[in-house]
Each structure stands twice: as C-alpha cells, then as structure tokens.
C-alpha cells in the first residue's frame, strides 16, 4: 500500500487546478486549504484501512468540487414554505415586503444617518426614524422599539414597575414560546406579581380587592397562542379603565401578535383588539411584535403615553436591547406600507397570504399541478384543505386553502418528506396520513421551479 501514499499529491500541486484557483478567488484561502487537507486526509485514511483506491488530480478535482458545494453552503438558507403556516416561527416567521428589503439593501450598502440629525448637524436618536410614522399610523403619543416583544415587556416592567406590585389574571400567565413565561419575565424585571382570579374566570372585583399602596397597575396579556372556551371570563381594558382612573394606576397590555388592521372585512374573524383599539380603550402602554401580524422584522414595539415612553428611553437596559440599522430600515418601510390599508394588504406578504381569496388559491394550485403532475413515479392531485396563521396568532382561525396531495410510488410519506427537506433548496411540507401536502397559500409562484426540480430528482 505504500505506493499509494506516494501517489497522494502535495497541496501545491492542487492549488494550480483551475477549479481550485477559481475557489481561491471566491472564498477565503484558509477555507479552500482546509477542504484540500481534508480530502488528502481522507485518502490517507482509506489507504491505512487497506482500501485499493484510484488517485489522480482529475479525481481529486471532482471530489474538491463536491466538498466545496457542501461546505460552501450557508447554514442559514432559503427554504420553500409549503406548510400553509403563514407566520412560521421555525421558518423565520413573517416574510418581509419588497420595500423593506430594498431599504435594508440601501442602508447596508452605504453609510446612513442612523444616529445623526441631518437638520441639526449633530448626534441624533436612532429611534426617531420610526417613532413618527408609528405614532401617525397608530394614533399614539410616543413609540419605542427594542429587539423583540419579550424585551419590550421586560423593559416596560423594569422601568415602570420595579419593586412594585402588578396585578395579572391567572388566566393570562402564559408561556410565550421557548419556555419564556410571563411570571419569570416579571420576576427578572424586579416586578412583584399579584395573581388574581381563576384560570378560566377573572372578574373586575378580583383586581380591585388586591389593590394596595404598593400597586402600580395592571398587566393584560393576550393568550394569543391558545384559547379557552366554555365557562370563561376575562376583564377587558375598558373595565380596567374604571379602576385605573379611580385609583390612579396604569394599564400595560402585551398584545403579542399585534394586528393593526381589522381583518374581519376580509373574512378573518379575529378575537383580539387592534393595537389602536387597546390604546383608545385606556391602555397606557401596549407592546407587540414586529414580525408577526405586522409582517415586518423581528422587533418589540412599545407604544403609549409620552411621559411613560420617555421614562423607558432613559432605562440603561435600552442599549442592550436596541435594534440595529437593518431592523430600523425594514420597520420604517413596513410601517410606510400601512399608510394605505389596501396597499398593505396587497404588498405585505403576511397580510397578502392571510387574505388570499379561495379562487385565487385554486388558480395558483392548478398552475403548480400542471407543472408537476407528469413527473413519473408520483401520484399528485389537488384538494381542498385548511391553513393556519401561525406564530401564536389567532389559534382558532382556519383558512380555506388548496393543496397538492403528493404520493410517491416507492417512497413512504416520511421518506419523501425527508428527501424534500434535504434538497439543495429545502422544501418544507406537512405530512397527513400517507401523503405529503403542499399548501399553495405560502408558496410563491417563483418557487414553483424549486418544487418541480426537487420532485424531478425523485422521479422513477
């Protein structure tokens, strides 16, 4: 076997190969060298194990291309969401609108006035770029943005409620994902939690009976990722407003998903208040997410009374929780879409997907069916089904949709799901019974080719 060791080329011999030289021009040198070293180590290991192998520059060149293709891919990548879940937490939540993407690119490619006041010629505030437009659209006195909604509620409590009691209904002490729970968030912020009522029923007198000299206010938390039905009751903001004014307390509401358009006119029976409605009914501070129903980037948006927002802006936590220029750019562009509701529904992907008409979905599904139905080895049909909004938003809502029901002649539904998930551009589907479903609601027409190519590879 020693003669095989002598056939292994040196790194310098590989560096003159055309494809390696191309890689050196397009990737960091150390990254390319690492791949070459790994290939040569693989050959040495095979020889050591007693394998008879063929070694040549031509073969090594081909192996290099394969390894570069594998290792040159980014870990964070595009996937096709064919699950029908519009706000898919595991797939990046909401897709952003073209305006937001364009604005991010503009800011990324250039210097910007992130913290520079162009009118005064001196240091400015990064939050000024979004505060005005948020206030204009929501009708609030002031606004502030941090990096997510958990951060938003934490800094609000830390600023306004530290070492004070805040009254919360037991039915609203929710877990908001990733094992982050409202009681723990309150404890971390130094707020004293006062639970009232029962899991299923809380009354106004439950709140009033617990008010004392150390009570600063009330926290309302929307149970957006689950719902209770039957013998239930919760106190709304308008009712709490009586206690707020009677005892001079504050009301904080964590809306979570944060819808700012009434979708009932589009056939979506939402149960939760709009952000504007909560403010109008008496909430002093409202927090919500930027990347759920709003359809923007990950952010925690805080709106409400100016005097309270100004206090929050002075909290030293704000620097640790602040958003970067890309989030600001995306958020400003997203809110600008909402200056015209019809424009927002048409151009913000989350809203567009949620409000699709059933005939529009049917037409789109027929187009995809026509493209893929003749791939051999598959049985593909179209059928009616339902989508969900996702992201903890409107858990009861079921949206009528169309899907492609896909079965493979040799692969089980589980194996087919894995093959599609492992595709170069992963196709993420849902499995129901003995077939996979491609829900057209969350698939863009420009992604039809990605699906076709993934299925074509599995023809038989």
Image (cartoon, helix red, strand yellow):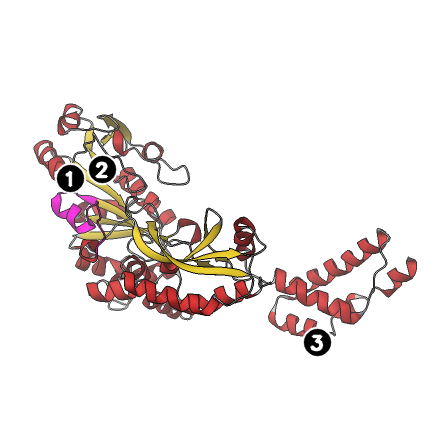
Q: Pointer 2: what residue?
A: 220
Q: Answer above or below: position of 196 versus 368.
A: above
Residue 277 in the image: x percent, y percent? 15, 48
Q: Which secondary structure lies at badge 3? A: helix
In the displayed structure image, the side of residue 63 where residue 169 appears, left or right? left
Q: Which secondary structure lies at badge 2? A: strand
Q: Pointer 3: what residue?
A: 18
Residue 63 in the image: x percent, y percent? 72, 65
Quadrant of the image containing the C terminus: bottom right
Q: Answer above or below: position of 257 versus 203.
A: below
Q: Residues within 10 Å of mark 3 (few under 14, many from 20)?
A: few
In the displayed structure image, the side of residue 102 where residue 423 appears, left or right? right
In the displayed structure image, the side of residue 148 where residue 195 appears, left or right? left
Q: CA distance from mark 3 to mark 1?
A: 69 Å
Q: Are marks 3 and 1 in contact (CB under 8 Å)?
A: no
Q: Pointer 1: what residue?
A: 237
Q: Of marks 2 and 3, which one's residue comes earlier in the chain?
A: 3
Span colored in magenta: 267-285
Q: Of marks 3 and 1, which one's residue comes earlier in the chain?
A: 3
Q: Are marks 2 and 3 in contact (CB under 8 Å)?
A: no
Quadrant of the image containing the N terminus: bottom right
Residue 304 in the image: x percent, y percent? 19, 48
Q: Answer above or below: position of 54 versus 164.
A: below
Q: Residue sitting at 63 percent across and 73 percent down?
A: 25
Q: Nearer the viewer, residue 238 or 365?
A: 365
Q: Quadrant of residue 28?
A: bottom right
Q: Residues within 10 Å of mark 2 (few under 14, many from 20)?
A: many
Q: CA distance from mark 1 to mark 2?
A: 8 Å
Residue 270 in magenta? yes
Q: Of marks 1 and 2, which one's residue comes earlier in the chain?
A: 2
Q: Residues within 10 Å of mark 1 (few under 14, many from 20)?
A: many
Q: Are marks 1 and 2 in contact (CB under 8 Å)?
A: yes
């Amino acid at each position: 076997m020693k003669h095989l060791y002598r056939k292994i080329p040196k790194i310098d011999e590989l560096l003159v190969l055309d494809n390696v030289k191309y890689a050196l021009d397009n990737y960091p040198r150390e990254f390319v060298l690492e791949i070459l070293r790994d290939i040569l180590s693989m050959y040495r290991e095979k020889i050591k194990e007693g394998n008879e192998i063929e070694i040549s520059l031509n073969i090594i060149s081909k192996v290099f291309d394969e390894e570069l293709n594998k290792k040159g891919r980014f870990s964070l990548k595009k996937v096709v969401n064919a699950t029908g879940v519009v706000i898919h937490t595991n797939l990046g939540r909401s897709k952003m609108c073209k305006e937001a993407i364009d604005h991010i690119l503009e800011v990324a490619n250039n210097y910007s006035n992130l913290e520079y006041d162009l009118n005064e010629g001196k240091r400015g505030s990064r939050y000024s770029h979004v505060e005005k437009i948020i206030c204009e659209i929501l009708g609030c006195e002031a606004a502030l943005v941090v990096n997510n909604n958990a951060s938003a509620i934490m800094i609000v409590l830390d600023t306004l409620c530290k070492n004070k009691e805040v009254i919360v209904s037991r039915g609203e002490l929710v877990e908001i994902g990733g094992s982050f729970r409202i009681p723990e968030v309150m404890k971390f912020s130094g707020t004293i939690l006062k639970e009232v009522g029962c899991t299923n029923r809380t009354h106004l007198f439950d709140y009033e009976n617990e008010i004392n000299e150390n009570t600063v206010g009330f926290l309302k938390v929307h149970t957006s990722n689950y719902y209770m039905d039957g013998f239930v009751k919760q106190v709304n903001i308008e009712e709490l407003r009586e206690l707020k004014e009677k005892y001079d307390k504050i009301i904080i509401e964590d809306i979570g998903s944060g819808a700012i358009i009434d979708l009932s006119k589009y056939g979506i029976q939402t149960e939760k208040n709009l952000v504007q409605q909560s403010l109008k009914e008496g909430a002093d501070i409202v927090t919500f997410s930027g990347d759920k129903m709003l359809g923007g980037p990950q952010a925690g948006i805080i709106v409400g009374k100016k005097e309270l927002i100004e206090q929050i802006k002075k909290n030293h936590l704000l620097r640790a929780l602040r958003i970067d220029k890309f989030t600001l750019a995306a958020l400003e562009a997203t809110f600008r879409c909402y200056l015209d509701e019809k424009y927002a529904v048409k151009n913000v992907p989350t809203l567009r997907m949620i409000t699709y008409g059933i005939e529009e979905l049917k037409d789109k599904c027929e187009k995809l069916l026509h493209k893929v139905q003749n791939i051999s080895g598959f049985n593909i049909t179209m059928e009616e089904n339902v989508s969900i909004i996702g992201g903890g938003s409107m858990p009861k809502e079921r949206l009528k949709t169309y899907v492609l029901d896909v079965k493979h002649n040799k692969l089980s539904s589980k194996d087919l799901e894995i093959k599609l998930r492992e595709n170069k551009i992963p196709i993420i589907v849902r499995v129901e019974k003995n077939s996979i479903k491609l829900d057209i609601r969350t698939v863009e027409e420009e992604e039809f080719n990605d699906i076709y190519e993934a299925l074509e590879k599995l023809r038989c």
